[in-house]
Amino acid sequence: MSATRTARTAAIALSLVAVLVAALGLAPAASAAPGDTTWVQTFDQEFINWATPHYASFAFPADPAAYSKVLAYVTIECPSSPDDCDPWDRLGHLRVVTPDQGDVEVARLITPYDITGSGFPGSCTWSSNVTRYKSLLQDTKELRLYVESWIGGTNGWLVSIDFAFIEGTLDPEPYRVVNLWRNDWVEYGNPDDPFSDHVQPMMLDVPGDATKVNVSMFVTGHGQGNTDNCAEFCPRTHSLWADGTEIQQNLWRANCWNNVCSPQGGTWSLSRAGWCPGDEARAWTADVTAAVTPGQSAVLDYQVEQYENLCRPGNPDCVPGVTCTDCNYNTTGHTTPHYTVQGQAIFWKPRASVVDAEIVPAAADGFSLDQNSPNPFRPGTAFAYSLPRAGAVTIAVHDAAGRRVLEARRTHAAAGAHSFTWDGRESGGRPVAAGVYFYSVTAEGRTLTRKMVRLQ
């Protein structure tokens, strides 16, 4: 481990002890004993200076039910002199790559403005509570780290992410996450392209054994120089509807001046629509348990307060210098008002049923995955799997770096044994290289994985 990372981990550990002391109401001498926290170190000073996702796989604890809280610590640093950070506030996020429903966002961030030079912190660390996603953060998982930067060259950000798994019991337990809306860019205030055309009502199947249902929404507003200076600098009421029940949120962060990453250059202290520069963009989590019925489908919808941006291209009533400073968008003071929207449903149930039904040997309820044969293989191989019930499955193959090379979806009309034959080719039809590969079968939100070896 690098000296920088060692120092950072020590600082994070001290802050974590403070969190535990405050949460438990303990004096400092009664802090958690060694071993109460399991650390998982993922991206380590990952250099990012362009809007290209960074993928990597990491080993997480096998039994998420052993931990009562999971925190993700994000550290942003700058390259060494003469290089520097990207000096602008950029949207970023961390997502877990899943074989059955794509990427699931578990944390969102905004990079700080300039933080180097005299009086500036040089680096910043904050934490996000990701406990509700701990069913995804187990075994080997592929993570997707993204920062919307276009600075290029040798400037950029060094991003590190460390997970703290705090031992303890949680009742009920979050045991399943389902992606809902996935919209990275939705224009706001254009009658010719309304928000509702992109974020539409959807059906959510509520499991019959769920005793608690949350909807978690990552929503941030961006764009400026428009009517009411939307969507970055205008507070707006956002509404989540669950089977006719409305839950409202005022999307606004009014305390950006009180920031762990301070001081900064630029307008970092101004209030914004759901975020602050140099901090996590916190998800809005709504409890919809009382509005839905286990074992039935619920209608979900997400809406934003009505608004029209009069300072937009194509609006015949927009007069530059009269009704608006500018009617055309540019790359600086007048940009398209829009929201970035990612949502999930999180299902919870009593801890006893999670431990008994979810954290058991894989074949105990009829769900199993056999070793492939032949293994090692050249050029193709096959494997068998069993299902406890009829239904859909997703079959995936990943290489040793965590890159998905093949995905297949099947629907079986009966429970029991089934098989899959792989010809050793990736989705595009090209033969894969020799090496170690992992194959998995996902059904009903659970995944079984085994290793195989492809010969030259």
Image (cartoon, grey):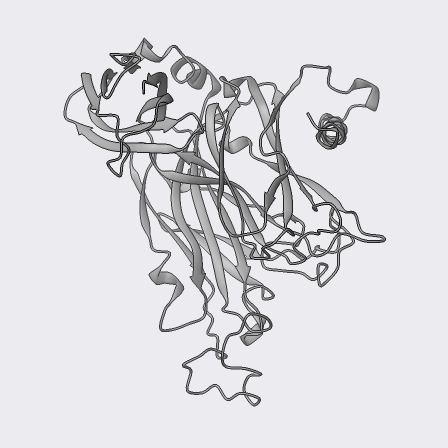
Front-lying residue, 286 or 266: 266
- Give the quadrant of residue 185: bottom left
Q: Residue furthest left?
A: 413
Q: Is residue 340 left or right of residue 280?
A: left
Front-lying residue, 86 or 14: 86
- Give the quadrant of residue 123: top right
Q: Residue furthest front?
A: 456
Q: Is residue 380 left or right of residue 4?
A: left
Would you place residue 349 above or below residue 276 in this image? above
Would you place residue 366 above or below residue 259 in this image? above
Front-lying residue, 303 or 317: 317
Residue 122 coordinates in the image, percent (x, y): 77, 47
Any part of residue 454 in sight? yes
Residue 129 coordinates in the image, percent (x, y): 60, 35
Q: Is residue 249 left or right of residue 254?
A: left
Which residue is found at the position 43% from the left and 15% from the top?
359
Any part of residue 209 in sight? no
Would you place residue 366 above or below residue 325 in this image? above
How many marks the image carries: the answer is 0
Would you place residue 332 above or below residue 407 in this image? below
Q: Is residue 193 left or right of residue 140?
A: left
Which residue is found at the position 42% from the left and 82% from the top?
315
Residue 448 coordinates in the image, percent (x, y): 35, 19
Residue 188 coordinates in the image, percent (x, y): 45, 66
Which residue is found at the position 39% from the left and 41% from the top?
179
